[in-house]
Image (cartoon, rainbow, N blue to C red):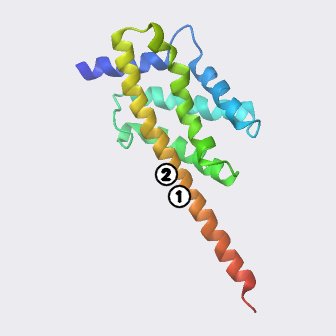
Amino acid sequence: MAEQGSAGELVGLLSVKDRDVAGEWVQQVLGTLKGRVSAAELGRELGELHEALVQALTQGAADVHGEQMSEVRALLTELSRNRARQGFSPTETAVSVFALKQVLEPVLQDGSADEIRAFGRLSRVLDGLGLFTIETYTRTREELISAQAEQLMELSTPV
């Protein structure tokens, strides 16, 4: 029963009635990507990610690698792969996840003890998702480098 209350508090952080958390998240990330991704594209990506994260937390997800987070991981995999192919850095890629913490930080200033504990739990989930994003980005970059090396070998081999 305490787990359900915990899930409700986490979802509550992401669904504050008088704030557009997803919109603020997009604005926070847009500033770090220096116009290399359109606001519309970023809005779509982070909007889908926000919805999937709320859904996973509503189902009581606590483990980043658990079944309930599969949609979130799929969206982060797509985002990471796209960023790796577009030449973004690992930091620019991971900020797409970590920026959500900055958007939610105001809870710490005037929040109740329960809200602050919920922020801590959500922060740990976001840390795990950020690490997943970096791992996926790194794998994709390694695949790209390997494919490029093979192409160079084929070009340098006499017919």
Rendered location of residue 119, percent (x, y): 41, 21
Q: Looking at this view, is 151 or 53 the one in front?
A: 151
Q: CA distance from mark 1 to mark 2?
A: 6 Å
Secondary structure at badge 2 equals helix
Indicate whether 22 appears above or below 151.
above
Left or right of 133 on screen, residue 28: right
Q: Tell me what residue is drawn at x 66 percent, y 29 percent.
A: 43
Q: Quadrant of the C terminus?
A: bottom right
**Image quadrant in which you'd find residue 40:** top right
Which residue is the site of mark 2? 135
Rendered location of residue 70, percent (x, y): 43, 42
Q: Residues within 10 Å of mark 1 (few under 14, many from 20)?
A: some
Count of labels in the image: 2
| Circle on res. 34 | none
**Image quadrant in which you'd find residue 102:** top right
Rendered location of residue 66, percent (x, y): 35, 41
Indicate whether 130 appears above or below 81.
above
Q: Tell me what residue is drawn at x 69 percent, y 75 percent.
A: 151
Residue type indicated by callout 1: Arg
Q: Quadrant of the N terminus?
A: top left
Q: Tell me what residue is drawn at x 70 percent, y 30 percent.
A: 31
Secondary structure at badge 1 equals helix
Which residue is the site of mark 1? 139
Q: Residues within 10 Å of mark 2 (few under 14, many from 20)?
A: some
Rendered location of residue 68, percent (x, y): 38, 37
Kindly give the residue lying farthest to the bottom in the view shown: 159
Left or right of 3 on screen, residue 110: right
Left or right of 135 on screen, residue 61: left
Q: Are marks 1 and 2 in contact (CB under 8 Å)?
A: yes
